[in-house]
Amino acid sequence: MTDPKTLAARFPGDFVFGVATASFQIEGASKADGRKPSIWDAFSNMPGRVFGRHNGDIACDHYNRWEQDLDLIAEMGVSAYRFSIAWPRIIPEGTGRINEPGLDFYDKLVDGLKARNIKAFATLYHWDLPLALMGDGGWTARSTAYAFQRYAKVVMARLGDRLDAVATFNEPWCSVWLSHLYGVHAPGERNMEAALHAMHYTNLAHGLGVDAIRQVAPQVPAGLVLNAHSVIPGSDSAEDKAAAERAFQFHNGAFFGPVFKGEYPADMMEALGDKMPKVEDGDLEIISQKLDWWGLNYYTPMRVSANPDASADYPATKDAPPVSKVKTDIGWEVYAPALKSLVETLYDRYELPVCYITENGACYNMGLDAKGEVDDQPRLDYYSEHLGVVADLIKDGFPMRGYFAWSLMDNFEWAEGYRMRFGLVHVDYDTQVRTVKKSGKWYSELAAQFPAGNYKSA
């Protein structure tokens, strides 16, 4: 169903349609106004870590073009903007001195959103940890959780009066497993013990961050953004089904368990508990404070089979082949039904609050054609199909409150550098010219129907 008006009719009138970005991916100005390096600045400058040794020094130059970019969001007619705040701009060393020019930038940004009647959804941490904190061990150190708590208090004291919602973390799966176990993201470690320390201290930081938000700006709905994995067994065999359950506990339960149940998955702890840091008295109570909302980032399913290698670390799985022949340019399988089964499974297993799809989108690398337009029909099809699934979930009674397309514009795609494009808006990195793609125009038509009458949600 690609007609935007027909699709719009399937959503309640107060459903939030937004776009999303992250600070390191778009801002640039990496040395401006007192900002100090993050772990991604360091990682990008190490040979062999990021494609083409691309970095975030300029990115989309959003730091200097924020007004133009907010005008673009307003012109697209979306009602909300999800952005992240760069810790190295606010407290450049991670601890110690507060950098006023950094706070001033986000002050202007939030005021600019308010002036354009766009809801402000802020994320406190989207992976750009101040590099100075690596001296203490970064996320593998308990002290980082308390540094984050202070940072959260500083930000909320300044911006909390104007934010519509705030998330503590974006995708801890990435900043824990991808960064400390698989070595793909900064700081590039490949060590289970380091990863488990990062897991617990990130979860603790989330809880301490919720504390900070509730103390300083209790009126702002507090949440957490998780890239939950839709884990599908590669076959109907008992071995593959057991492998899928282990993978679910490792990839989802490591975060959903402590946050929504106050406990780590038992099987995972039995397998890996000896490599865990000490979980101190009170930690799980801090981590499992009730949230006002949660965000789900979904792109592609995870298909797994049992790994017969006796020396394989828990969860002892290997990749199973995709079922759909459709893949995006980054190589990810397109399979929308997994989004529906994932939400159903998560609400079945955990007591979850209302949900926003905080990221969903597709990587297609089409450039400008002879007419100066970008025909990215496959991306439009991806959005249409996945939004159809969100509408189905609403019909089935799930509390889906909003959807944020990833991303507003092409940007620094982490280890892939600038070669992979997820934007609704094309960015020419030489000229910084923004061009709304076919998918962006379509999404704009859909978003323009909201907010509408006939609110159906509670």
Image (tube, rainbow, N blue to C red):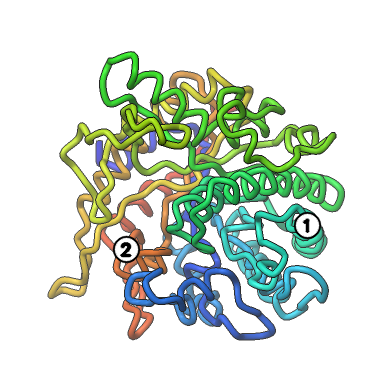
**Is residue 396 in sight in this rendering?**
yes
| 437 or 77: nearer the viewer | 437
Could you say which disc has been placed on residue 208 in the image? none
Identify residue for label 1: 143
Q: Which residue is mark 2?
A: 421
Q: Quadrant of the C terminus?
A: top right
The location of residue 441, given as percent across then percent down, is: 31, 57
Mark 2: amino acid? Arg
Q: Amino acid at mark 1?
A: Ser
Report the side of 175 relative to 90 (left or right): left
Q: Residue furthest front?
A: 311
Whether residue 299 sits left or right of residue 268 in the image: it is left
State the SS at label 1. Answer: helix
Q: Is residue 161 visible?
A: no
Label 1 or label 2, whichever lies nearer to me, is: 1
- Along the horizontal axis of the image, is 159 left or right of 371? right
